[in-house]
Image (spheres, rainbow, N blue to C red):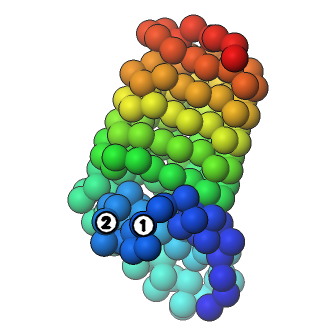
Amino acid sequence: MRKDPFWDADLARYATKRPFLKEQSIWAIWIYRFGRRVDYRKNGVIKKLQTEVYWVLFRIVETLTTISIPKSALIGPGLRIWHFGGIFIHSNTIIGSNCTLRQGVTIGNRGEDQLAPVIGDNVDIGAYAQILGDIRIGNNCKIGAMSVVLQNVPDNATAVGIPAKILFK
């Protein structure tokens, strides 16, 4: 099996040597990366079996950790989830590289037919933050804990509050 540079970058963000034993969030990230690899396989029996395995593992890990990262989301390398639990990512979300999520984060749409957010690189999202709608969070941003972000956030800015106000560094 080939090395997955995205998975290697994810693991590198976990300080512990054996994150599978100490960090439940890594289970959800691993299932997500596995599902993405399965999607790139050629159609056939193996892909079909692996897809079935993915869905079973996805539901088990989603139930145990309350982290939902569907394989259709596009997430760059180096995802780090601190303090697992209550994390939901919309299936059409795009997240850049080296992003950090904390417990209770929701990244999703605001209505049935609306698009999901696009998150840039090196974004740090605080606990229980909600990022909703067809918006873009720029590179190197910070989203404060419990913020509700409903508008674009430019590069290198911080968004805090309900609804979030944009602060510049």
Provide residue 42's location: percent of width, then percent of height.
Answer: 68, 83
Provide residue 71's location: percent of width, then percent of height.
Answer: 54, 60
State the residue at coordinates (32%, 61%): 24
Using the rendered view, name the quadrant where residue 118 is placed. Answer: top right
Q: Distance between the residues labelled 2 and 1?
A: 8 Å
- Which residue position holds label 1? 16
In the drawing, does residue 161 fall left or right of residue 38? left
Q: Can residue 72 be seen in this view?
A: no
- Which residue position holds label 2? 22
Provide residue 109's location: percent of width, then percent of height.
Answer: 52, 30
State the residue at coordinates (64%, 11%): 167
Q: Is residue 157 visible?
A: yes
State the residue at coordinates (61%, 71%): 8
Marks 2,1: beta carbons within 8 A = yes
The image quadrant where one finds the N terminus is bottom right
Give the amino acid at mark 1: Thr
Q: Which of 139 and 67 is in front in this view?
A: 139
Q: How crowded is mark 2: few (under 14 residues within 10 Å), some or many (20 or more)?
A: few
Quick one: label 2 or label 1, which is nearer the N terminus? 1
Q: Nearer the viewer, residue 97 or 117?
A: 97
Provide residue 7's location: percent of width, then percent of height.
Answer: 59, 69
Is residue 125 placed above or below 168 in the rendered structure? below
The image quadrant where one finds the C terminus is top right
The label shown at residue 141 is: none
In the drawing, does residue 152 fall left or right of residue 50? right
Mark 2 or 1: in front is 1
Q: Which of 70 and 154 is in front in this view?
A: 154
